[in-house]
Amino acid sequence: MHISTILRGCLVASLTAVSSFSFAQKVVTTEKTGQLETLITEAEREKTPSLRVVGPINGEDIQVIRTMCGRDYSGYESEGTTRTLDLSEALIKQEAGKNYLNEQLGFYNRFYAPSADNEIGIKMFYRCEPLREIILPKTTTVIAGQAFDQCTSLTKCTFSAGLTTIRQYAFRNTKLTNVELPSTLTAMEAKVFDGCKELTTVTFTSKAAPSMPGELFPNCPKLKTIIVPKESLAAYTAALKLPEGVTIEGREGITAVRSAAASAAVVEVARFDLQGRRLAQPQKGVNIVRYSNGTTAKVVVR
Protein backbone atom coordinates (compact mmCIF):
# COMPACT_ATOMS: atom_id res chain seq x y z
CA MET A 1 0.00 0.00 0.00
CA HIS A 2 2.81 2.31 0.96
CA ILE A 3 4.72 1.48 -2.24
CA SER A 4 1.61 2.05 -4.32
CA THR A 5 1.16 5.47 -2.75
CA ILE A 6 4.77 6.35 -3.50
CA LEU A 7 4.40 5.25 -7.12
CA ARG A 8 1.24 7.30 -7.52
CA GLY A 9 3.06 10.29 -6.04
CA CYS A 10 5.94 9.87 -8.48
CA LEU A 11 3.52 9.59 -11.38
CA VAL A 12 1.72 12.78 -10.35
CA ALA A 13 5.05 14.58 -9.99
CA SER A 14 6.14 13.39 -13.44
CA LEU A 15 2.89 14.51 -15.04
CA THR A 16 3.16 17.88 -13.31
CA ALA A 17 6.70 18.31 -14.64
CA VAL A 18 5.56 17.46 -18.16
CA SER A 19 2.57 19.80 -17.99
CA SER A 20 4.74 22.72 -16.85
CA PHE A 21 7.43 22.08 -19.47
CA SER A 22 8.11 24.99 -21.83
CA PHE A 23 9.14 24.16 -25.38
CA ALA A 24 12.53 25.41 -26.59
CA GLN A 25 12.82 27.65 -29.64
CA LYS A 26 10.29 26.74 -32.28
CA VAL A 27 11.48 27.16 -35.88
CA VAL A 28 8.74 27.14 -38.51
CA THR A 29 9.25 27.31 -42.27
CA THR A 30 6.28 28.16 -44.48
CA GLU A 31 6.03 27.47 -48.20
CA LYS A 32 3.03 29.75 -48.64
CA THR A 33 0.93 32.12 -46.54
CA GLY A 34 -1.70 30.84 -44.12
CA GLN A 35 0.21 27.78 -42.89
CA LEU A 36 1.07 28.69 -39.28
CA GLU A 37 -2.37 27.60 -38.05
CA THR A 38 -1.49 24.00 -38.91
CA LEU A 39 2.27 24.12 -38.31
CA ILE A 40 2.08 25.31 -34.69
CA THR A 41 0.05 23.25 -32.23
CA GLU A 42 -2.21 24.70 -29.53
CA ALA A 43 0.23 23.53 -26.84
CA GLU A 44 3.16 25.19 -28.59
CA ARG A 45 1.25 28.47 -28.83
CA GLU A 46 1.12 28.66 -25.04
CA LYS A 47 4.53 27.29 -24.06
CA THR A 48 7.06 28.46 -26.66
CA PRO A 49 9.45 31.07 -25.23
CA SER A 50 11.27 31.65 -28.53
CA LEU A 51 9.86 31.57 -32.08
CA ARG A 52 11.56 31.85 -35.47
CA VAL A 53 9.49 32.06 -38.64
CA VAL A 54 10.95 31.59 -42.14
CA GLY A 55 8.95 32.16 -45.31
CA PRO A 56 5.82 34.07 -46.42
CA ILE A 57 3.19 35.05 -43.84
CA ASN A 58 -0.09 36.98 -44.05
CA GLY A 59 -2.47 38.55 -41.53
CA GLU A 60 -3.85 35.19 -40.41
CA ASP A 61 -0.34 33.90 -39.72
CA ILE A 62 0.40 37.06 -37.75
CA GLN A 63 -2.77 36.37 -35.75
CA VAL A 64 -1.17 33.09 -34.61
CA ILE A 65 2.09 34.88 -33.75
CA ARG A 66 0.20 37.54 -31.77
CA THR A 67 -1.56 34.84 -29.77
CA MET A 68 1.83 33.33 -28.91
CA CYS A 69 3.04 36.79 -27.83
CA GLY A 70 0.16 37.39 -25.42
CA ARG A 71 -2.80 38.85 -27.40
CA ASP A 72 -5.59 37.04 -29.25
CA TYR A 73 -7.51 38.03 -32.39
CA SER A 74 -9.90 40.27 -30.41
CA GLY A 75 -7.09 41.97 -28.53
CA TYR A 76 -7.71 40.16 -25.26
CA GLU A 77 -4.92 38.64 -23.20
CA SER A 78 -3.97 35.12 -24.30
CA GLU A 79 -1.99 32.33 -22.65
CA GLY A 80 0.97 32.88 -24.97
CA THR A 81 4.40 33.35 -23.41
CA THR A 82 6.70 33.94 -26.39
CA ARG A 83 9.42 36.39 -25.36
CA THR A 84 11.81 36.26 -28.31
CA LEU A 85 10.61 36.55 -31.90
CA ASP A 86 12.87 36.20 -34.94
CA LEU A 87 11.16 37.25 -38.17
CA SER A 88 14.37 38.08 -40.04
CA GLU A 89 13.64 35.51 -42.79
CA ALA A 90 9.87 36.03 -42.84
CA LEU A 91 8.12 37.78 -45.75
CA ILE A 92 5.03 39.78 -44.79
CA LYS A 93 2.36 39.69 -47.50
CA GLN A 94 -0.69 41.92 -47.86
CA GLU A 95 -3.76 39.82 -48.65
CA ALA A 96 -7.34 41.13 -48.59
CA GLY A 97 -9.44 39.79 -45.74
CA LYS A 98 -6.50 38.20 -43.93
CA ASN A 99 -6.59 40.10 -40.64
CA TYR A 100 -4.55 39.81 -37.46
CA LEU A 101 -6.74 41.94 -35.14
CA ASN A 102 -10.47 42.55 -34.77
CA GLU A 103 -10.89 45.53 -32.43
CA GLN A 104 -14.34 46.35 -31.10
CA LEU A 105 -14.94 50.10 -30.98
CA GLY A 106 -18.35 50.83 -29.53
CA PHE A 107 -20.98 49.56 -31.96
CA TYR A 108 -18.59 48.62 -34.75
CA ASN A 109 -15.45 46.58 -35.30
CA ARG A 110 -12.20 47.62 -36.89
CA PHE A 111 -10.11 45.01 -38.65
CA TYR A 112 -6.33 45.25 -39.01
CA ALA A 113 -4.13 43.64 -41.66
CA PRO A 114 -0.87 44.58 -43.39
CA SER A 115 -1.75 47.39 -45.81
CA ALA A 116 1.24 46.55 -48.01
CA ASP A 117 3.88 43.88 -48.45
CA ASN A 118 6.89 44.22 -46.13
CA GLU A 119 5.02 46.38 -43.62
CA ILE A 120 4.80 45.94 -39.86
CA GLY A 121 1.12 46.91 -39.73
CA ILE A 122 -0.88 49.17 -37.42
CA LYS A 123 -1.13 47.64 -33.93
CA MET A 124 0.47 44.44 -35.19
CA PHE A 125 1.96 43.69 -31.77
CA TYR A 126 -0.12 46.14 -29.72
CA ARG A 127 -0.08 45.23 -26.01
CA CYS A 128 1.91 42.02 -26.49
CA GLU A 129 3.36 42.33 -23.00
CA PRO A 130 5.41 39.08 -22.89
CA LEU A 131 7.46 40.10 -25.96
CA ARG A 132 10.99 41.15 -24.98
CA GLU A 133 13.05 40.95 -28.17
CA ILE A 134 12.17 41.02 -31.86
CA ILE A 135 14.18 40.82 -35.08
CA LEU A 136 12.21 42.43 -37.89
CA PRO A 137 12.02 40.89 -41.38
CA LYS A 138 15.01 41.88 -43.52
CA THR A 139 12.59 43.18 -46.14
CA THR A 140 10.70 45.53 -43.80
CA THR A 141 10.28 49.04 -45.22
CA VAL A 142 7.59 50.55 -42.96
CA ILE A 143 6.71 50.27 -39.27
CA ALA A 144 3.13 51.52 -39.01
CA GLY A 145 1.53 53.49 -36.18
CA GLN A 146 1.27 51.79 -32.78
CA ALA A 147 2.93 48.64 -34.14
CA PHE A 148 4.59 47.94 -30.77
CA ASP A 149 2.56 50.35 -28.63
CA GLN A 150 2.27 49.15 -25.01
CA CYS A 151 4.71 46.26 -25.48
CA THR A 152 5.80 46.98 -21.94
CA SER A 153 8.51 44.27 -21.79
CA LEU A 154 10.15 45.02 -25.16
CA THR A 155 13.82 45.83 -24.56
CA LYS A 156 15.36 45.15 -27.98
CA CYS A 157 14.29 45.61 -31.60
CA THR A 158 16.63 44.77 -34.48
CA PHE A 159 15.71 46.92 -37.47
CA SER A 160 15.98 45.92 -41.12
CA ALA A 161 18.64 47.53 -43.30
CA GLY A 162 15.97 48.70 -45.76
CA LEU A 163 13.63 50.43 -43.30
CA THR A 164 12.47 53.84 -44.59
CA THR A 165 9.55 54.94 -42.38
CA ILE A 166 8.46 54.72 -38.74
CA ARG A 167 5.01 56.08 -37.93
CA GLN A 168 3.41 57.69 -34.87
CA TYR A 169 3.50 55.92 -31.50
CA ALA A 170 5.22 52.88 -33.03
CA PHE A 171 7.19 52.14 -29.84
CA ARG A 172 5.18 53.99 -27.21
CA ASN A 173 5.64 52.76 -23.64
CA THR A 174 8.19 50.06 -24.46
CA LYS A 175 11.35 49.31 -22.42
CA LEU A 176 13.85 49.97 -25.19
CA THR A 177 17.14 51.24 -23.74
CA ASN A 178 19.41 51.76 -26.77
CA VAL A 179 18.15 52.22 -30.32
CA GLU A 180 20.25 52.20 -33.48
CA LEU A 181 18.38 53.26 -36.63
CA PRO A 182 19.39 52.16 -40.15
CA SER A 183 20.97 54.43 -42.74
CA THR A 184 17.98 53.97 -45.09
CA LEU A 185 15.55 55.75 -42.75
CA THR A 186 13.95 58.79 -44.41
CA ALA A 187 10.86 59.63 -42.31
CA MET A 188 9.75 59.45 -38.68
CA GLU A 189 6.40 60.69 -37.42
CA ALA A 190 5.82 62.40 -34.07
CA LYS A 191 6.02 60.56 -30.75
CA VAL A 192 7.54 57.37 -32.12
CA PHE A 193 9.22 56.74 -28.75
CA ASP A 194 6.68 58.45 -26.48
CA GLY A 195 6.87 57.19 -22.89
CA CYS A 196 9.99 55.02 -23.35
CA LYS A 197 11.11 55.57 -19.79
CA GLU A 198 14.24 53.37 -20.02
CA LEU A 199 15.55 54.86 -23.27
CA THR A 200 19.03 56.39 -22.83
CA THR A 201 20.71 56.53 -26.25
CA VAL A 202 19.53 56.76 -29.87
CA THR A 203 21.89 56.48 -32.84
CA PHE A 204 21.02 57.74 -36.33
CA THR A 205 23.22 56.30 -39.08
CA SER A 206 21.78 58.09 -42.13
CA LYS A 207 23.97 60.90 -43.46
CA ALA A 208 20.82 62.76 -44.48
CA ALA A 209 18.60 63.67 -41.53
CA PRO A 210 15.20 61.97 -41.90
CA SER A 211 12.02 64.03 -42.07
CA MET A 212 11.05 64.52 -38.41
CA PRO A 213 8.28 67.15 -38.19
CA GLY A 214 7.29 66.39 -34.60
CA GLU A 215 8.92 65.58 -31.27
CA LEU A 216 10.09 61.97 -31.26
CA PHE A 217 10.97 61.51 -27.59
CA PRO A 218 8.37 62.98 -25.21
CA ASN A 219 8.25 61.47 -21.72
CA CYS A 220 11.65 59.79 -21.98
CA PRO A 221 13.24 60.90 -18.68
CA LYS A 222 16.45 58.84 -19.03
CA LEU A 223 17.27 59.92 -22.58
CA LYS A 224 20.66 61.64 -22.56
CA THR A 225 22.35 61.23 -25.93
CA ILE A 226 21.51 61.34 -29.62
CA ILE A 227 24.41 60.14 -31.81
CA VAL A 228 24.57 61.17 -35.48
CA PRO A 229 27.17 61.14 -38.28
CA LYS A 230 29.68 63.92 -37.60
CA GLU A 231 29.30 65.51 -41.03
CA SER A 232 25.52 65.75 -40.51
CA LEU A 233 25.53 67.25 -37.01
CA ALA A 234 24.16 70.62 -38.14
CA ALA A 235 21.34 69.03 -40.15
CA TYR A 236 20.24 66.81 -37.27
CA THR A 237 20.51 69.66 -34.78
CA ALA A 238 18.12 71.69 -36.93
CA ALA A 239 15.73 68.79 -37.60
CA LEU A 240 15.39 67.25 -34.14
CA LYS A 241 13.05 68.61 -31.48
CA LEU A 242 14.63 67.37 -28.26
CA PRO A 243 13.73 67.56 -24.58
CA GLU A 244 15.88 69.76 -22.37
CA GLY A 245 19.09 68.12 -21.22
CA VAL A 246 19.51 65.82 -24.23
CA THR A 247 22.77 66.24 -26.18
CA ILE A 248 23.48 65.59 -29.86
CA GLU A 249 26.87 64.07 -30.64
CA GLY A 250 28.43 63.95 -34.09
CA ARG A 251 30.70 60.92 -34.49
CA GLU A 252 32.91 59.78 -37.33
CA GLY A 253 32.46 56.43 -39.01
CA ILE A 254 28.72 56.03 -38.46
CA THR A 255 27.54 54.47 -41.71
CA ALA A 256 25.39 51.45 -40.84
CA VAL A 257 23.61 49.67 -38.03
CA ARG A 258 26.18 48.29 -35.63
CA SER A 259 25.84 45.73 -32.87
CA ALA A 260 24.79 46.88 -29.42
CA ALA A 261 27.95 45.32 -27.99
CA ALA A 262 30.16 47.39 -30.28
CA SER A 263 28.29 50.56 -29.39
CA ALA A 264 28.51 49.89 -25.67
CA ALA A 265 32.29 49.36 -25.81
CA VAL A 266 33.03 52.98 -26.77
CA VAL A 267 33.21 55.43 -23.85
CA GLU A 268 34.14 59.08 -23.39
CA VAL A 269 37.68 59.67 -22.12
CA ALA A 270 38.05 63.48 -22.37
CA ARG A 271 36.07 66.63 -23.17
CA PHE A 272 37.24 70.08 -24.38
CA ASP A 273 35.76 73.43 -25.39
CA LEU A 274 36.34 74.99 -28.82
CA GLN A 275 39.49 76.70 -27.50
CA GLY A 276 41.00 73.33 -26.57
CA ARG A 277 40.56 73.76 -22.81
CA ARG A 278 39.72 70.55 -20.96
CA LEU A 279 36.27 70.45 -19.37
CA ALA A 280 35.47 68.70 -16.12
CA GLN A 281 31.83 68.36 -17.13
CA PRO A 282 29.61 69.16 -20.14
CA GLN A 283 29.09 72.88 -20.83
CA LYS A 284 26.36 74.50 -22.90
CA GLY A 285 27.32 75.04 -26.51
CA VAL A 286 29.71 72.96 -28.62
CA ASN A 287 32.00 70.51 -26.79
CA ILE A 288 34.77 68.40 -28.35
CA VAL A 289 34.63 64.83 -27.01
CA ARG A 290 37.38 62.22 -27.32
CA TYR A 291 36.36 58.53 -27.14
CA SER A 292 38.15 55.35 -26.10
CA ASN A 293 38.32 54.10 -29.71
CA GLY A 294 40.40 57.15 -30.73
CA THR A 295 37.63 59.10 -32.46
CA THR A 296 36.53 62.63 -31.60
CA ALA A 297 33.14 64.27 -31.95
CA LYS A 298 31.56 67.69 -31.75
CA VAL A 299 28.73 67.56 -29.23
CA VAL A 300 25.98 70.15 -28.90
CA VAL A 301 24.98 70.56 -25.25
CA ARG A 302 21.69 72.37 -24.67
Image: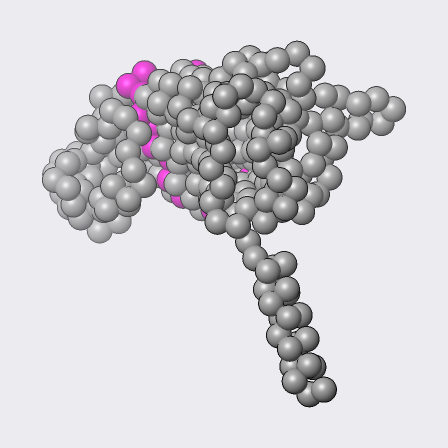
Question: Which residue appears at 31% of the width and 29% of the height?
Answer: 257
In the figure, is residue 174 to the left or right of 294?
right
**Location of the N terminus (image quadrant):** bottom right
**Looking at the image, which is closer to me, 272 or 156?**
156
> At which x and y percent is residue 24?
48, 49
Tell me how the rendering is colored. one colour
Question: Which residue appears at 26% of the width and 49% of the height?
Answer: 281
**Looking at the image, which is closer to me, 111 or 64?**
64
**Looking at the image, which is closer to me, 71 or 184?**
71
**Location of the C terminus (image quadrant):** top left
* Residue placed furthest toward the bottom: 2
In the figure, is residue 226 to the left or right of 289?
right
> At which x and y percent is residue 148?
56, 33
> At which x and y percent is residue 85?
49, 38
Q: Is residue 236 visible?
A: no
In the figure, is residue 92 to the left or right of 248?
right
Quarter of the image holding residue 225? top left
Question: Which residue appears at 69% of the width and 81% of the height?
Answer: 4
The residues colored magenta run 195-211
> At which x and y percent is residue 236?
34, 23
Question: Which residue appears at 38% of the width and 18% of the height?
Answer: 162
243 up-or-down from 267: above or below: above
Q: Is residue 131 visible?
A: yes
Inspect the magenta stretch and tell me whether residue 146 lies in it: no
79 up-or-down from 171: above or below: below
Quarter of the image holding residue 145? top right
Chief secondary structure of the magenta portion: loop
Q: How many marks?
A: 0
Quarter of the image holding residue 89? top left
* Residue placed furthest toward the right: 107
